[in-house]
Structures are given as C-alpha cells and as structure tokens.
Amino acid sequence: MTEDQLNAALQAEYLHLQKTIEDFDSRALTIKAWSVTFGLVSIAGAFASHSYIPFLISSMSTAIFWLLETQWKLFQICYSSRSSLIEEHFRGKAKVEHPFQIGSSWSTAWKAIRTQKLKQVPLWPHVALPHAFVMILGILLFFLSITHVIDLDAP
C-alpha cells in the first residue's frame, strides 16, 4: 500500500470513527431523556398514588440509566483511542501502518480501560447529570415520606 493509499484509507476510517463517536453522544441524550422522563413520572406517580414505593422505583431506575450511560461512554472512549492515533499520524507524531483496525483497536482499548475508568466516568458531570439529581430527589422524597415529613395522604 502506498503512502497516499494509506492516508486515504486512514482518512476514511477517521471520518467513520468520528461519525460513530458523534452517534454515541446522540444516543446518550436519548438515555438521559428516558431516565428523566421515567424518574420524574415515577415521582409524580408516588404523589398520585399516595405511596412511597414509586420514589424507590424512580431512584433505582435512574441508577440503572446512569450505569447504562456510563457503559455507553466507555464504549465511546474506546473508539476515541483509535481516532486519536489517526490524528497523531496526520500530525506526524505517530505512524499508523495499517488502516481499518477499528475492531481490534476498540477491543484493546476496552481491555485497558473498562475497570480503571468505570469508577471515574460516572462522576463526570456530563455523565452524572441529570441522573444524579433525579436519583437523589427520589431517595430524599422516599425518606421524607417514610418519616412523615411529607404526607402523601394529604389532599
């Protein structure tokens, strides 16, 4: 493969990776929307049903969506490692010998980061919000209702 062919192939790979990475951001917004919608509807359901159990359901479901978004962000990061390597190639800082290595690069990155970053990524503000807010709200309302600070039976 000539240098021009390699560069053309790497450019195509890079553009595909960038599209994939952007698609992850779009889907992350969908996960956030589902989380907030279900969480807040559950909280409203607690008041409508005069029961504190939906507060727990809200918090647990939001935690699951938060975990899902964390996994999604980890998957995205794995694609970013190959994208960064290709950028370094075009800046002349690294030499990429073989194009079209998205799968093997992703797998290598996944093995390297999955346990290390699993504790960090959920705490990133753009991952934690709005999940953390809805989860804490549900837990707070649960405890306020079981201690009768708020009365769910009041008209």
Image (spheres, rainbow, N blue to C red):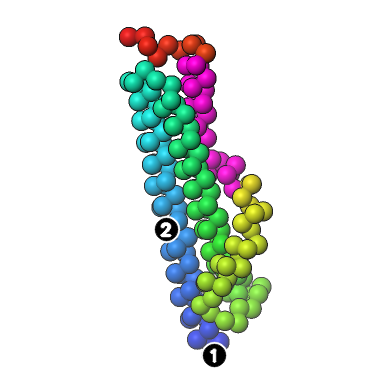
Residue 10 is left or right of residue 44, and the answer is right
* Residue corresponding to mark 2: 23
Numbered circle sitting on residue 84: none
Q: Whole-percent x and y of residue 50?
A: 36, 17
Q: Is residue 58 above or below residue 19?
A: above
Q: Secondary structure at mark 2?
A: helix
Q: Whole-percent x and y of residue 38?
A: 38, 36
Residue 90 within the segment the image draws in magenta:
no
Residue 125 is left or right of residue 12, and the answer is right
| Residue interval drawn in magenta | 121-146
Q: Quadrant of residue 12?
A: bottom left
* Residue corresponding to mark 1: 2
Q: Nearer the viewer, mark 1 or mark 2?
A: 2
Front-lying residue, 66 or 96: 66
Name of the residue lying farthest toward the top? 154
Q: Residue at x 38, y 30 (%)?
A: 42
Q: Residue at x 48, y 42 (%)?
A: 64
Number of other residues with Cα within 10 Å of mark 1, as a class: few under 14, some 14 to 19, many 20 or more: few
Whether residue 131 is visible: no
- The answer to which of marks 1 and 2 sits earlier in the sequence is 1
